[in-house]
Image (cartoon, grey):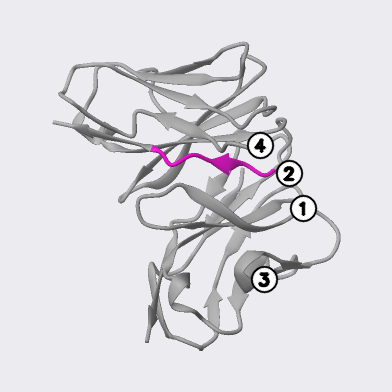
Amino acid sequence: KAGVTQTPRYLIKTRGQQVTLSCSPISGHRSVSWYQQTPGQGLQFLFEYFSETQRNKGNFPGRFSGRQFSNSRSEMNVSTLELGDSALYLCASSLGSRAAETQYFGPGTRLLVL
Amino acid sequence: AQSVTQLGSHVSVSEGALVLLRCNYSSSVPPYLFWYVQYPNQGLQLLLKYTTGATLVKGINGFEAEFKKSETSFHLTKPSAHMSDAAEYFCAVSAQGGSEKLVFGKGMKLTVNP
């Protein structure tokens, strides 16, 4: 089975722009979660989608949003980019939404905001 | 709410020596505990997890961890370090009904010296 894929792998944007990142989960997985990883804050949960509905949301401003499509693929969008948004954005998928389920991570999208 | 503490950020061991990475958690409900490993420029890979049942959990690459409820700990060990174990290790907690899918510790960078 193919793993979690994320596109693009690298991205450079300037302040004020917006960006859309894409995640394709493992086939059959219906839950997709997004995380932000930075040297200062570590790994932080952004949000989770299950069956096209947002199930949980972390403590991030409204500039961060996401959605999930009927094929379970997910996108996250960051509007009005700030320098502090530079990070590795990781997507993870799991079969369902139960807390005990293993999440499988993609390689991440590295975003640099100039 | 859940939280994870990984004291320190770096640990260095000699090849063949014991690896011990400490993790303490806080959770108001029964926790599910995970250890993930991240190699440079890659996503996270699950090493092992504890949900219920046996408190000593064996994972991949010779790692194991023991859930100790009385100490709120889930320390990761490996009897003999290998050069290929050099990576960053993250302890994480989740709980049913939690607002965040996974809450991660700050991570521990493991260096293995020849």
Residue at which label 4 appears? B98
* Dot 2 and dot 3 within a common chain: no
The reply to whether residue A59 is visible in this rendering is: no
> Residue tagged by mark 1?
B51
How far apart in space, not on screen, are marks 2 and 4 (Cα)? 11 Å
Look at 62% across and 41% down and name the residue there.
Answer: A103
Marked residue nearer the N-terminal end (1 or 3): 1
Q: Disc 1 vs disc 3: Cβ atoms closer than 8 Å?
A: no
Magenta stretch, residue numbers: A102-108
Q: Are the two marked residues, 2 and 3, in contact with CB atoms closer than 8 angstroms?
A: no
Identity of the amino acid at label 2?
Answer: Ala
Crowdedness of circle 3 by 10 Å Cα count: few (<14), some, many (20+)? many
**Amino acid at circle 1:** Thr
Amino acid under label 3?
Glu
Label 2 and label 3: CA atoms lie apart by 18 Å
Q: Which residue is mark 2?
A: A100
